[in-house]
Amino acid sequence: MVTLHWTVNEENGRVETVTLVELVVENTTTVPVRIRIGNRLDGEIRPPRRNGVPEAGWDEGGFEGVVTADERRALGYAVATDPDHGSPPAEIVWTERAPRTETSVSDTERGVIDGELEIEPTATGVIRALGDARPPADVVPMPHPTKLPDAVEAWLSGIETRTERYEANEGKMGEKDVNEQTREQELRRKLEVDGRTLDSVAKRVDTVRERIAAAQETHSVERKI
C-alpha cells in the first residue's frame, strides 16, 4: 500500500503569501511502485530546482516517479496561494507496479543509476546533471541585478514576517493563554533557527565574494602579462 502524509506551512511575505507543502510518500509493499502525485491547491507549482530547471519527475501538475519497496520518501514544493486547511494539499492520482530495474525517486533526483551519472538526452537533462555552463563575465556583459532572485526574496520575506510577528507580541506573555504562549515559543524556536541559518549564509556569501575577488585579480594579472 502506498500512503501520502503531508504538512502545510504558510509564509506571508511582503509581496505574496506562499504555501509550503511537505509530503512523505510511503510504500509499504514488497515491490517498487510508480506514482503520480497531483497538486490540489489553486496556483502554479514551484517545484524544487537544480541549476534553474525543475528536479526530475516534476511538471506543472505535480510529481511522477518510482518509490522502491519499503521506502519512505520526502518531497516538497511551494504554491503562491493561501493554504486550504480543510482539505489535503495533494493527492495520489494513480499508482502502478514498476519494473524492478527502475530507479527510485532519490536516485532519479541525483541523476545516478548503478553508481554512474545518468544524463537525460535533453537540454534540461544535461543542465540538471552537469550544471549550466556560463561564459566568462568579461565576454558577455551581465545586467546589473535590480532585485533578489524570487526564491531568495520569498525566503527572506518569510523571516521578516516571523520577526515582525514576534516583535509585535513581545512583552505580552502574561496576557496570553496557554495555546498562545505555546505558539509564541514555537515562533521563537523558528527565529533561532532562522538566525543560525542567516549566519551560515553570511559566512558562505563572504567566502564566495572572496573567491570571486581573488579570481578576478588573478585574471587581471594574467591579462596584463
Image (cartoon, rainbow, N blue to C red):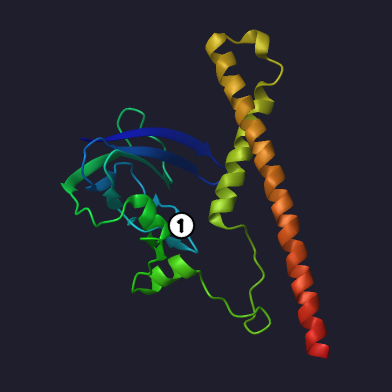
Residue at (42, 72) in percent of width and height = 126
Which of the two residues, 203 or 148, is positioned nearer the viewer here? 203
Tell me the quarter of the picture where residue 191 sits: top right
Q: Is residue 134 left or right of residue 20?
A: right
Q: What kind of element bears circle 1?
A: strand
Q: Position of residue 23 (x, y in %)?
A: 37, 39
Which of the two residues, 214 or 156, is positioned nearer the viewer here? 214
- The N terminus appears in which quarter of the rendering? top left
Which of the two residues, 76 or 104, is positioned nearer the viewer here? 104
Q: Position of residue 208 (x, y in %)?
A: 71, 61
Q: Would you say residue 44 is visible in this rendering?
A: no
Looking at the rendered structure, the kind of residue marked 1 is Arg
Q: Would you say residue 149 is visible in this rendering?
A: yes
The residue identified by callout 1 is 49
Tell me the quarter of the picture where residue 57 sits: bottom left
Q: Does 213 sit above or below residue 18?
A: below
Q: Is residue 69 left or right of residue 120?
A: left
